[in-house]
Amino acid sequence: MTMDHTAPGASPAMPDHSVHDHTTMDHSDPHAGHDHMTMVHSDPHAGHEQLFRRKFWVSLLLSIPVLWFSDGFKALLGISLPGFPGDRWIGALFAVVVFIYGGLPFLQMAIPELKNRKPGMMTLISLAITVAFVYSLAMLFVPGGMDFFWELVTLIDIMLLGHWIEMRSIRQASGALNALAKLLPDTAERVVAAGSSEVVAVSQLHADDVLLIRPGATIPADGVVVEGDSSVNEAMISGGIESGG
């Protein structure tokens, strides 16, 4: 079997046990399995899932009094709830807590964007909640002024929920990459002089090394088959297709 391999990265394909004893492969692109693990664990989003989940639930609970005492929210639903003098200050107090507790992460993440002069999503969110917060505070001192406290806390809650889901998706994707990296072998059998072979770490492989792939072994790196024939289980890559010659 002749294999002309062109895709980058190590191939975890498994040769079938029922075929010839070995296939030699010309190594052309060495990749260490542990290097892949390091890349997975260096994800800057790691650990943020718990942070956003906790802030979402706490902010959601603190938002209930804001909605309860908000005239704008009650008017939107067409309901009339009993109130008392100064009740709008209660909603404003809880809105301040939600802004500081739930909105602070967005303000912190917007700082690097502004420093690098590359405004992005965090800058947009920070601008929206800051303008709503400052305007609503000012309206507390204007007779008959309408604030946006309930819109403010609702926006913060939705953004926290969205980022919680995003961080969870990233964690799950990282777990899949971890599982994939575990399939990559740590060692390879390299052919040396006089046709003998030696076991070396994958990180010690170089271009043009000739590797011996035995039946049932995992292919440790990309390359081209130069001798022998076999069939290769590419289920992990192609969904269950075997290639052979």
Image (spheres, helix red, strand yellow):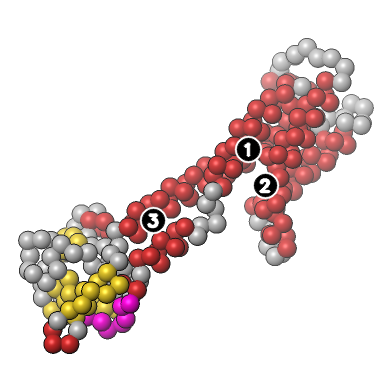
In percent of width and height, residue 238 lies at: 25, 58
Query: Which SS class for mark 1?
Result: helix
Percent coordinates x, y for residue 42 in the rendering:
50, 60
Classify residue 7 by image quadrant: bottom left
Looking at the rendered structure, the kind of residue marked 3 is Leu
* Residue 223 position (above or below residue 167): below
Separation of residues labelled 3 and 2 (CA atoms) = 28 Å
Q: Which residue is mark 2?
A: 105
Residue annotated with mark 3 = 177
Q: 111 or 35: which is nearer to us?
A: 35
| Crowd rating for badge 1 (residues with CA inside 10 Å; few <14, some 14–19, many 20+) | many
CB atoms at circles 1 and 2 under 8 Å apart?
yes
Q: Where does label 1 land, which residue? A: 55
Crowding around mark 3 (Cα neighbors within 10 Å: few <14, some 14 to 19, many 20+) is some
Q: Looking at the picture, which amino acid does disc 1 mark?
A: Lys
Magenta residues, start to end: 204-210
**Quadrant in the picture for the C terminus:** bottom left
- Secondary structure of residue under mark 2: helix
Please state, as top left, top right, bottom left or bottom right, where the N terminus lies in the image. Answer: bottom left
Q: CA distance from mark 1 to mark 2?
A: 10 Å
